[in-house]
Amino acid sequence: METRKTKLGADHPDTLTSMANLALTWKAQGRQADALVLMQGCAQAQQRVLGPEHPNTLSTQAIMEDWSI
C-alpha cells in the first residue's frame, strides 16, 4: 500500500484498493482495531474520490457494516 501511495498517490483508486485489501488481511490476522481504522479511512477516501454509488465504495461500506455486527 505504501508503494502505491508513493507511486500513484494516496487517492488513486488502485491505492484505495490496496488499502482495503490490507485492512481485510489485518482483520484475518486478528488485528481488528487496526483493520477497522484503515477500512474507515479507505471508506472516507472512496466516498470523496469515487463517489458514494461506486461499487468499490458500496463494497467497503458493506464490509464495515458486517464488521460492526
Image (cartoon, rainbow, N blue to C red):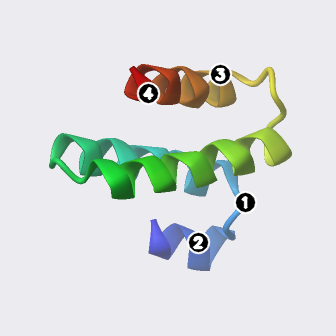
Closer to the eye: label 3 or 1 = 3
Percent of width and height locating residue 2: 47, 74
- Indicate which disc residue 62 carries: none
Circle 3/circle 1 CB separation < 8 Å:
no
Q: Please report the residue visible at 36 percent of the width from the left and 58 percent of the height from the top.
A: 34
* Amino acid type, callout 2: Lys
- Mark 3 highlights which residue? 58
Q: Earlier in the sequence, mark 4 or mark 1?
A: 1
Taking the image as shown, residue 35 lies to the left or right of residue 15, namely left
Mark 1, secondary structure of its residue: loop
- Choose the circle earlier in sequence order: 2 or 4: 2
Question: Does dot 3 land on a helix, a strand or a loop?
Answer: helix
Instruction: Using residue 26 as the reference point, say whether residue 50 is left or right of it.
Output: right
**To which residue does mark 1 refer?**
11
User: Contact (CB < 8 A) between labels 4 and 3?
Assistant: no
Near-viewer residue (24 or 3): 24
Among numbered discs 3 and 2, the one appearing first in the sequence:
2
The alpha-carbon separation of the residues under discs 3 and 1 comes to: 17 Å
Left or right relative to 52: residue 33: left
Residue type, numbered disc 4:
Ser
Tag 4–tag 1 contact (CB < 8 Å)? no
Classed neighbour count for the residue bearing mark 4: other residues with Cα under 10 Å, few (<14), some (14–19), many (≥20): few
Q: Which residue is mark 2?
A: 5
Using the numbered discs, state the Cα–Cα distance from disc 2 to disc 4 in whole angstroms.
28 Å
The residue drawn where x is 44% and y is 47% is 36
Residue 68 got which mark? 4
